Image (cartoon, coloured by chain):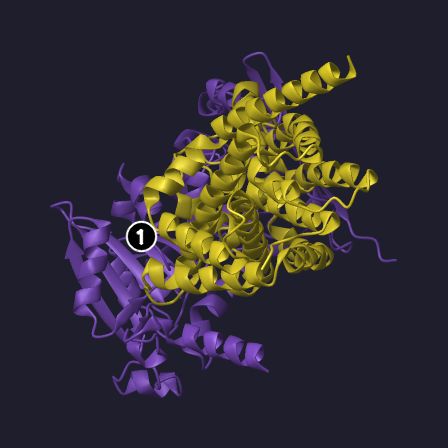
Chain colours: A yellow, B purple
Amino acid sequence: MKLRIAHDAAAAAAFVAAAARIFVGLALDSVPIHNGVWIAALLGALPAIPYLLCLEAVQAEAQPNRPAYRMLMLLLASVALLDASEVLSVVAKTSEYLTINHVPLTVLTVPVALAALWCICRNGDAVGYAAMLWIRVFPVLLMLVLLLQLPHLHVRWLQPRLGDGWRAIANGGVRTAGWFVPSTAILFVSDRGGALPAKHVSRAWLACAALVTAPLLALRLMMAPTVVRNASWLFNLDALLTNGRAPLYLQLPMILIWFVGLLHLLSCDCFAATALLQRLFPAIDGRACAALVVLGTALLSIHDFSVALNRSAAPWVFILAASIVGLYVLVLRDSKGGEHR
Amino acid sequence: MKKPGMLALLAALCMALSGCQVTGEVENQAYVLVLALDSSDDGALTLTARVPQIGKSGNKGEQEKAGDSPYLVFSVSAPSWSLALDALQWSTPRQVNLSHIEMIVASEALASHASFPELMNQIADTPHLYTNARFVVCAGSAKAFLEAGKTVIGTRLSSEINAMLSQYARQSFIPDASFADACYSANAIYGDPIAIWGYTADAAPSGNDRGISVVESPMWQRFSGTALFRRGVFVRALSPEATRLLNLIRGQSKVLSHVWQDASYELELDSPPDIKILIDGSDVTISLRVALHIDDSLPDGVVNALETAIKADIDQLIVDCRQAGCDPFGFAELAAGQFATVPQWLAFDWPGRYAHAAVETLVRVSRRHAS
């Protein structure tokens, strides 16, 4: 089985994944940015777009036998795998938070991992076109959330508007750029079909991801006031999903948005890691690659160390990936120039 | 045909993932409806839980008369919140379920302790605890307050407390305060939290039943007034009359029942109160404008006197709150908007500025003209 995904499907999947990833990262992260969090989301898109431009240039000149190209694929696969493990951990912990009974984390992880495996085995277009469907359903659910929670939202809680200041926002922006990297991995493995305008589609989708996430984060800020204590992960999750104090029936649309967004992000990350693994080792069957990736994701997700590593590595991931991709583009340009001479 | 069969099998296998664990059946749960928190002299935390007996929802009044309460009360003491929860699990013959709590009651002594904000955070961080419960601070013992609770009207145990407190909040005798809101406010960069003030009929604080004569009632619990906090620590209680004004300023009530010279007048807000915070360097001026209307049959003298009386009462309320060091009005939220960053706002030291701010109150009462 060869893993493939059409470029437009990959762009849709990358859009949903990037938006969900930034939202998860910035809404639940304990590093304080406070009210400036939505500005950080927008700021993070600025370096991510040129990075994607360079990545597309590298992809256009696909040279799978070059060590540098293989290194880049390995980096993207690792980043996607590590990211998937954190996402799976978030899904499992959210399920644990919502269950009535105390259930071991491993029990909650297995069904989600199986779902991700099934998605990958349906191949890339299933992942991508499912994201396209979600893009149509999501605004309806969001409107429902807004309508139900409108009396509980406070615009004043958006102020002071810069939160912890520009320094913290810039820090959040770099982390946001780091969260774009795993989402771009699926674009890297997509079939471009030689259509040039398709390149611009993916860039537009990623810019949209930041534009969509910013109001979502602003919505989160209006749900519960900014707190100055070092809030726990559970405290932040509770504030996000239940508005801290919304009646139980109001929680369902928000929980649907949260879970479905996370499942799309997980399937996108896992598919990208699997497809990259298959390109690195073409002899291995797609299903075997999928099983390996999902198993790896599940094992990593139950260890706090790997989750914490992914959380703290986000800025460095971007710097590393951008440096490699940038250097690769420079080398490509030099070699092209040499050919012309 | 093979694939759907495989999918169905996988889905069915997922249902077996819980293995041999005990399932969360209703019969196996002890749903806590009210949780009372007390502190003892040796610093221990006493946790009292009121749990309904499933299957005894009907004819509660008659059951209680016969001494057969539809509720069970479990009480434990331990040095900390987590140990107290453990002890509660141990002492209750079913799994303690905190996901349907309707009311959290803290005793005045516990809520006044400096460690209370930390306890609130621990409660908020407890998994599967429903933090949207009403939050009450009571005079005397919280356990005694909980035990004084009776089901009087209605047939569903689960809706009894909610229906009662919603009614009091609608009448503006109490603030519409939840535990989650109080916990957020205690940790937030804006104003101070508030809670519902409660007491038992035999422990009524002097002056709190001012103007209200309870002749006879099967209700032994009283919910009347507001508990004020300063940075998460309880400082004092407000009367029901002051609570009505507070609810009006906070935008939680559009109607004001005002008692003046042994008569009650019902006024309605023309528009939400206009509050402005003017900051000039270190000087702060709070400007509050309230426009109300009243029945057009009242003479000019009464309307003018009401205007003066309400203004005096609002001024007194603000003075009382400032003396207690509390900002329950939401003034801080408005002031914070004038700062670019959180550190700048925190460095401004709002509690200190608020204590010395100039207050300009304007109350206008006009007659409602029949259209």
In this view of the protein, can residue B84 be seen by the observer? yes
Name the residue at 68% across, 26% down.
A50
Please state the horizontal and vertical placement of residue B266, each as a whole percent of the image: 65, 55
Residue A226 placement, left or right of B294:
left
Of helix, strand and loop, which one carries label 1? strand
Which quadrant would the C terminus of chain B be assigned to in this image?
Answer: bottom right
Identify the residue at image location x=39%, y=49%: A301
Q: Is residue B225 visible?
A: no
Place of residue B61 in the rendered image (x, y in percent of width and height, measured from the top left): 37, 84
Residue type marked 1: Ala
- How crowded pointer 1 is (Cα within 10 Å; few <14, some 14-19, many 20+) is rated as many
Q: Which residue is mark 1?
A: B106
Closer to the camera in the image, A274 or B191: A274
Question: Looking at the picture, how far across and down is residue A271, in whole percent?
Answer: 56, 52
Residue A255 locus on image (x, y percent): 55, 58
Outermost residue toward the right? Answer: B371
Considering only vertical position in the picture, is B289 above or below B52? above
Q: At x 66% / y 42%, what residue is drawn?
A: A187
Q: Tell me the subunit letter for badge 1.
A: B
Q: Nearer the viewer, residue B272 or A171?
A: A171
Foreground pick, B129 / B283: B129
Which of the 4 image quadrants contains residue B291?
top right
